[in-house]
Structure formats: C-alpha cells, structure tokens
Amino acid sequence: MNFKTIANSLLFKIVVAIILGIVCSLFFPEWLARVFITFNTLFGNFLNFFVPVLIFALITPAIAGLGRGAGKWLGITTGVAYGSTIISGLIAYGLSLALYPTLLAGQELNTNVEDVDEGSLQPYFDVEIPAPFEVMTALVLAFCVGLAMTAVKSDTLYSASRDLERVIMKVIEAFVIPLLPLFIFGMFLNLGMNDNLGSTMAAFGKVLVLAVIMTWVYLVIQYLVAGAVAGKNPFTALKNMMPAYFTALGTSSSAASIPVTLRSTLKNDVDRNVAGFTVPLCATIHLSGSMMKLVLYAFAIIYMTGMDVSVGKAIGFLLMLGVTMIAAPGVPGGAVMTAVGLLSTMMGFDENMVALMIAAYIVIDSFGTAANVTGDGAIAMIMDRFASGKIDAVRDEYGSDGAYPYKTDTIDQSRESLGGSSSV
C-alpha cells in the first residue's frame, strides 16, 4: 500500500483532522475559531435533515431485497444475525454500567459551545434545516414500503428504490464524506479551546482500548457457542477465520472481505451452499463488532456529560440501532453514520457529541469491521448444523454463484471513491 492510497483514505484524513484541530486550538484566535464553529453548526443541521432521508433510502431496498430472497433459512439466518448484534449491544451496555463509574471516574465532557468562555465560541449565524420526517418515521416507512414491495412483487418500485439509493450514495460520496474531516477538525478545535481536550482524550483513550478488547472477547464467545452447536473445536474454527479478520482489518470493508471470509468459512467444513448463502447475507446484516463499539462510545459520552438515560430507553436504543444498521454496509463511514439519527433523537446528542462519536468510531473502525466478518463465520457454522444440504433450492432460485441482493457493488464503488475506506 503506497502513501497515495493511505493519504486518500478516510481514516488518514480523520486522523490528520484530529491532530490539526488539537494543534490549531493552541493558537487560533477566537474570531477564526468561530468560523469553524459556524461550519460545524450548519453541517450538523444538514446531517439532522439528511439522516432520515438516508435511512429511508438505504433500508427500503435492503428490506425489499431480503424479502425477495425470502425463505425459512433466510429468516432464521437473519434472526440469528440480529440476535448476535443485539446481544453484543447488551453486553456493551452492561459493561458501561459496571465499569464506567470506575474507569471514567471524575471525567466530565462539555462539548456545548454555548457554555465555553461565557458563550464566546458561538457560530456567526445559524440556519435551521428541518428534517422532512423523524428518524422513527423513516424506519417505519422503510419497513412498510420494503415489505409491501415484496408482497406485491413491484419490480418498478423496487428499481426506483435502488435508484434513490444510488442518488443518496452520491450525496454521501460527493458531499458528506469530503466535509467530514473538516467537521471533525472543528469539533476538536472547539474541544481544545474549551480546555476540555485533555480530559476527553484521556477518557476516550480508555474507551477505545476497552472497545477493541471487547470485540475480541465477543468473538471468542461467538465461536464457543458456534462450536458447541456445530460440535467443532471453537478455537480451531476461530484460527481458520484469521485470514478474514486481517483482511477486514486492512480493508475496513465487509464486502471486500467476502471472498476471504467465504474461503475461511469453508475451512471450517461448512457446506459450500450454506457458506455461499450465509456469508454474503451476514456481510449486510451482522454487525456485532460495530454494535459493541457504538454502544461503548455512546454511553461513555452519556456518562461523561451526566445525561440521564433510563434502562428502558437504553434497550430501546439498542433494538432500534440493530435495525438501523442494516443500512450500514451501504454507507461510507459505516454504522456510526446510520446511528446519527438515533443518537440525536433518542439519546439527545448534539452535533458536537455526534462528531466525537464519528471521530472515535473511525479511529478504530477496522477492528469493528474485522469482528463483524469473523463473526459471520460463527453464524455460518451454526446454520450449517441445521441447514446443510437444504439450501440448494435457494441457490438455484437466486443464482448458482449464491448471488444475493446485498450491497457489494455499492460498497465497492464507495471504497474506490474514498481510497479504500468504506466501512461497516
């Protein structure tokens, strides 16, 4: 990998933005800093407007696509993948309740620009951009339309939804992603000028390490369960999946890792038809590693800001996040981009909290992606125990190569436009 490829990646740009934001906070005059605060306010307002549209545009064809491949094994695999993702979130939530009072003791996070230097770091102006509908409305509408398209077999409407998906992807690639590093820069510039940077980075450094460790721990748990169900050695199976893990670690893309994931899964003596069906499907819907990171980050911010979130609201957030992230493989920047709406509406995050979430997520983005794809192998082992020799009909109907309407083409196009940084 040459320097040009690295320099064009989203991760590199985000890291540079973080460093520049920290450095510039040491000497930028207030009037200049407020320019970037103004940009962050406007861009944050745009994201609040755009995210519900994004969720509808990406989830609708995804649900319709799942329906078109509908069958008993599709439903079971989807249920197992969703369950794995939710369990990951519940573990992360439980850890945050148990560990953060000790791990983040005395840490406070203040990202509200209106409270800094008696309100001096405020935007020069603000433009309200109301969202066309709420995030929950977008989710419900996407499910209703997606399922309805399957019921009436509307190829025309399905094609139109795919066209809308491509339009939204173009907006993301051409507008949102190029401006994201500037958004992160402004957020860290603001943190530095708040004199709040040191405590934030120290606290989040601990959370980053915890997130990486927990993705490993959850992989072991997944393979212990899969090994018990399939009657195979879980550690040998996990070892066989390491090529997929490191491929995803390097590419930050579930789609780009599918060939290696499939080959590694076959080494675990999984039926070829089961693997060919399960691996591409789970590349779209199984995001346990991403869920682990998002929940740990979100509740770290909640703890440090002193926000009050009930257990009921937290569990509701996890359940909705598991559904929302169906759109994640089609979005450069991954699960955190599709989670923005829920973070804002359900958890009360402002644009600066969201920016911190995005920055922290992308810094170790590939570890979540690697956990996602490696976990796909565990699900394939579980499905092989029950579905071996029974998925030929599905493959015959949807293509001898195991073709399935997941978003590989969309992801690969996004990866190319971002220098290989499309993530899950």
Image (cartoon, rainbow, N blue to C red):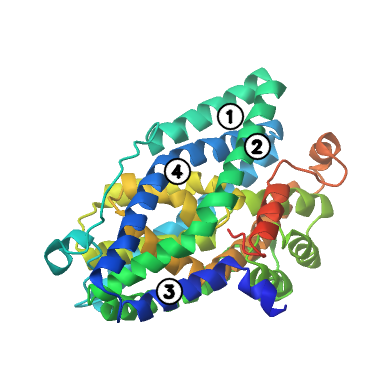
The mark nearer the N terminus, 1 or 2, is 2
> What distance separates the C-alpha of mark 3 from that of mark 2?
39 Å
| Front disc: 3 or 1 | 3
Q: Are marks 4 and 2 in contact (CB under 8 Å)?
A: no
Q: Which quadrant is home to the N terminus?
A: bottom right
Q: Are marks 1 and 4 in contact (CB under 8 Å)?
A: no
The mark nearer the N terminus, 3 or 2, is 3
| Front disc: 1 or 2 | 1
Mark seen at residue 66: 2
According to the image, label 1 marks what residue?
Answer: 146
The mark nearer the N terminus, 3 or 1, is 3
> What distance separates the C-alpha of mark 4 from that of mark 2?
22 Å
**Whether residue 385 is visible:** no
SS at badge 4: helix
According to the image, label 3 marks what residue?
Answer: 18
SS at badge 3: helix
Q: Amino acid at mark 4?
A: Val
SS at badge 2: helix
Q: Are marks 3 and 2 in contact (CB under 8 Å)?
A: no
SS at badge 1: helix
Please indicate whether residue 183 sits to the left or right of residue 242 in the image: left
According to the image, label 4 marks what residue?
Answer: 51
Q: Amino acid at mark 3?
A: Ile
Q: Amino acid at mark 2?
A: Leu
Residue 42 appears at what percent x and percent y?
35, 50
> What distance separates the C-alpha of mark 1 from that of mark 2?
9 Å
Q: Which quadrant is home to the C terminus?
A: bottom right
Pick the front one: 45 or 342? 45
User: What residue is at 27 percent from the left and 52 percent from the top?
Assistant: 311
User: What residue is at 48 percent from the left and 45 percent from the top?
Assistant: 324
Residue 376 appears at what percent x and percent y?
65, 59
